[in-house]
Image (cartoon, rainbow, N blue to C red):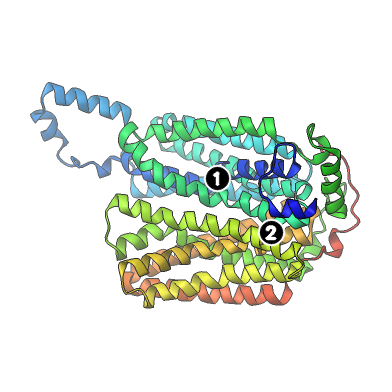
Amino acid sequence: MGKSRNSVLFKSSKSSEGRRNCFSVLNQWRPDPAARKEETGIPFVQMDNQFSPRKGREDQWWENSTKEELQKEVRKLLENPVYNWSPKTQGIIFSSISYGTLIIQIPVGYLSEKYSIKKMIGSALLLSSLFSLILPMAAEGGEACIIACRAAQGVSQGSALIAQHAIWVKWAPPLERGRLTSLSLSGVLLGPFIVLLVTGFICQSLGWPMVFYIFGACGCGVSLLWFLLFYDDPKTHPCISVSEKNYILSSLNQQQSSSRTQSLPIKAMIKSLPLWAIVFGSFAFHWTNIMLLYTPTFVDSNLHVNVKENGLLSALPYLFAWSFGILAGHAADFLLSRNILRLNTIRKLFSTLGLFLPPFFGLCLVHLSFSFYSTIVFLILTCSTGSFCMTGVLINALDIAPSYYGFLKGVTNVIGMIGGLISSILCGMMLNENPESGWFKIFFLMAGVNVTSLLFCLIFGKAEIQDWDKDRPEQTRL
């Protein structure tokens, strides 16, 4: 049974592995903050009238236009309303989703150990999708309304982003953990890739409000599928066979987790060097990952392509990052199931690849790119190889403390996002000071942060359950 399970990714609906992969695919298609940023970014140009080609000469245009032209323009404005937002207001609107995402992750991580994951994620998906549907109407209500809507959407997004990690505490046997978690996490990369490809075409053909209507409707459909197909653990699944249920439960053994009757062992967590290794690794990963957001800027300033080509080239790193993440998950499970490497070695191997390769290829991008195609290759490798961390430091908390995985994931993710925020600010300052030498400084600083964090991970990283996670009493989830 174990061998066939490790050799095939998707099996029949009677197999619990097929169901676990179904959960991974549903997680891939859940709305996520990265995709929402891209979803908003492209139509933002059409929402703000400062980009109108007639800006500054509207009165002259209205006076010289025919009746048919005026009627056509009125219909166009009704379908694609524009707003006079200042650059400061635009920045607040664009980043407001991050505020909600940042503040909710630690509480949700803690609550995911106490309440039904099915209800938490399903409700978060539905609310996020509903906020997407009403966002065009919120824009009509003014800046305060759209900022509030985006922040509330960030709360929903952050809830789904963190709560979904707790699924694998009860559903992912150790020999399948790599590919199941990487398949799920890679949705954060697949979402922006799809959004970058289709949003521009939707804006051009149907108008920018349809972007939010279409993605909001798709999100509602995914939330419905979630409620119909997902179950909190194998014990409650109505279709799983007895043999499969026993396999999952026996393989997880003492690693299963439920809500706790006592407080979190905060003091022990703070003293845990393996946990600090995860914190450093998460900080470095998010610091590096900010390069994905700066890809359009790099393409525009160095390759001088048009908008459509920029969109395509900016989407390619997300596609390769998604592919590398899934490949890493399969490779990790293969190495573990064949007893080629120990789990701790596997985690450190993929953490090394995910933290060392991006700055390495980044420096190659600056010094060894002598043609258009070499620049594209190094750019893709710089932005995509960080996804090897998905089977390294990003799921390491599941190895050392499965009982508190949701809470720890929330904490490490928030610290990582702070690293990404610092990185984004410094990148903007360096590029504003000197656009030509700024990229070298960015990649050199990235190398320093990543190598330092990686050394800490290699020295103190572990993949065994820690003493402060063992022998905890359990109670039934609500």
Q: Inspect the image, locate mark 2, and give the three-letter code of the amino acid beneath it.
A: Ile
Residue 173 in the image, given as x and y percentages of width and height: 78, 52
Q: Inspect the image, locate mark 1, and give the three-letter code of the amino acid beneath it.
A: Asp
Q: Quadrant of the C terminus?
A: top right
Residue 76 in the image, given as x and y percentages of width and height: 26, 29
Q: Is residue 114 above or below residue 400?
A: above
In the image: residue 313, left or right of residue 251: left
Q: Is residue 215 above or below residue 172?
A: above
Q: Badge 2 is on which residue?
A: 395
Q: How many C-alpha atoms fall within 10 Å of the one at disc 2: few (<14), some, or many (≥20)?
A: many
Q: CA distance from mark 2 to mark 1?
A: 18 Å
In the image: residue 303, left or right of residue 365: left
- In this view, the residue farthest toward the left is 64
Residue 51 in the image, given as x and y percentages of width and height: 26, 44
Q: Badge 1 is on which residue?
A: 32
> Between 377 and 466, which is closer to the camera in this rendering?
377
Q: Is residue 249 above or below residue 414?
A: above
In the image: residue 73, left or right of residue 326: left
Q: Which residue is at a point 41% across and 60% down the rendered structure image?
A: 294
> Between 155 and 6, which is closer to the camera in this rendering?
6
The reply to whether residue 405 is visible in this rendering is no
In the image: residue 50, left or right of residue 276: left
Q: How many C-alpha atoms fall within 10 Å of the one at disc 1: few (<14), some, or many (≥20)?
A: many
> Between 123 and 253, which is closer to the camera in this rendering?
253
Q: Is residue 34 above or below residue 57?
A: below
| Helix, strand or loop for disc 1 | loop
- State the mark number for residue 348: none
Counting the numbered discs, the total is 2
| Helix, strand or loop for disc 2 | helix
